[in-house]
Amino acid sequence: MLATVTLGWDSGFHYYLLMFIPSIFISTNTRKAVLSVFVLWCFYIGLNMLTAFVPPLEPLPAQGLIALRYFNISVVFLMFAYLSSYYYRSILGAQERLRKLAITDPLTGLYNRRHALDLANYEATQQKRKSDPLSFIIADVDHFKHINDTYGHDAGDAVLIEIGKAIRMSIREQDSASRWGGEEFMVVLPQTDLEAAMLVAERIRARVAATDVPVDKHEITTSITLGVSCFRMGETISNVIARADHALYEGKKTGRNRVNAAS
């Protein structure tokens, strides 16, 4: 305001007042923002009327005034461009964080059940189109209730986190791992037949069995049992997952800490 009154309206310093508009809307609720912008508009109009009737306190030569005005326009333009870019990147970042929250299990960092089903259906569609093999692994933590009852639920959470890491380290980039529910996990293996999927499942089993989870003064040794199935042409996703789940519980019956293939 002082620069505008001193050098006149044509100096272009009043443009900087417009920079407050996006900041006002971002920093407060809509009702307060509208009121604040209305006050700013009144101030802007009042400043314009003041400079229309009151001559500049320190008038500049015409050429100097033109140069100053274009300088201020350029600065404001660059500032608006920077702010627009900053807010755009912030919005994209927020959208990406929300997307990850929507598809990720918050405890293990693996995909959640809903997104796992979406991925499974997508891979099944690809399998039908390309005729590539597609396999599924369902894994269940052995004696998980005993871990919770003995060491507490925090210990159970720590076990799930470590198993999630072990699964993630045992699969390829194109594979997807998810927390299927409770202490169960699912892995979708595109372009993988039953034999290759069994090798992946055994790699996961061995890595988990070799992992000791530190909880307070204890080292919890864990194991998992895994069921493996391969997608058949014309089969539904729920059916192939059910077959892997059935193979898993057959493995449970025969001793746990093993890999079992679906028939």
Image (cartoon, rainbow, N blue to C red):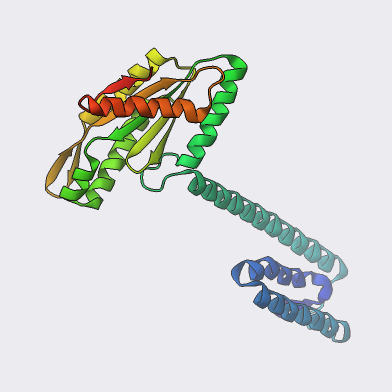
Query: Where, quadrant-wise, is the N terminus in this rendering?
Result: bottom right
In this view, the residue in front, 197 or 32, is 197
Q: Quadrant of residue 19?
A: bottom right
Q: Quadrant of residue 66?
A: bottom right
In the current view of this chain or complex, which residue is farthest to the left?
217
Question: Residue 156 location in percent, x, y?
Answer: 25, 46
Q: Is residue 107 left or right of residue 133?
A: left
In this view, the residue in front, 54 or 154, is 154
Q: Residue at x 48, y 27 (%)?
A: 239
Question: Residue 181 location in percent, x, y?
Answer: 38, 42
Query: Where, quadrant-wise, is the C terminus in this rendering?
Result: top left
In this view, the residue in front, 136 or 165, is 136
Asked if 231 appears above or below 178 in the picture, the reply is above
Q: Residue at x 28, y 47 (%)?
A: 157
Q: Residue at x 50, y 41 (%)?
A: 114
Residue 5 visible: no
Question: Residue 80 location in percent, x, y?
Answer: 70, 59
Q: Is residue 139 left or right of residue 78?
A: left
In this view, the residue in front, 263 or 32, is 263
Asked if 12 appears above or below 164 in the picture, the reply is below
Q: Is residue 262 left or right of residue 35?
A: left
Q: Residue at x 42, y 36 (%)?
A: 178
Residue 114 visible: yes
Asked if 230 appears above or below 52 in the picture, the reply is above
Question: Residue 168 location in percent, x, y?
Answer: 37, 32
Asked if 67 appears above or below 222 in the picture, the reply is below
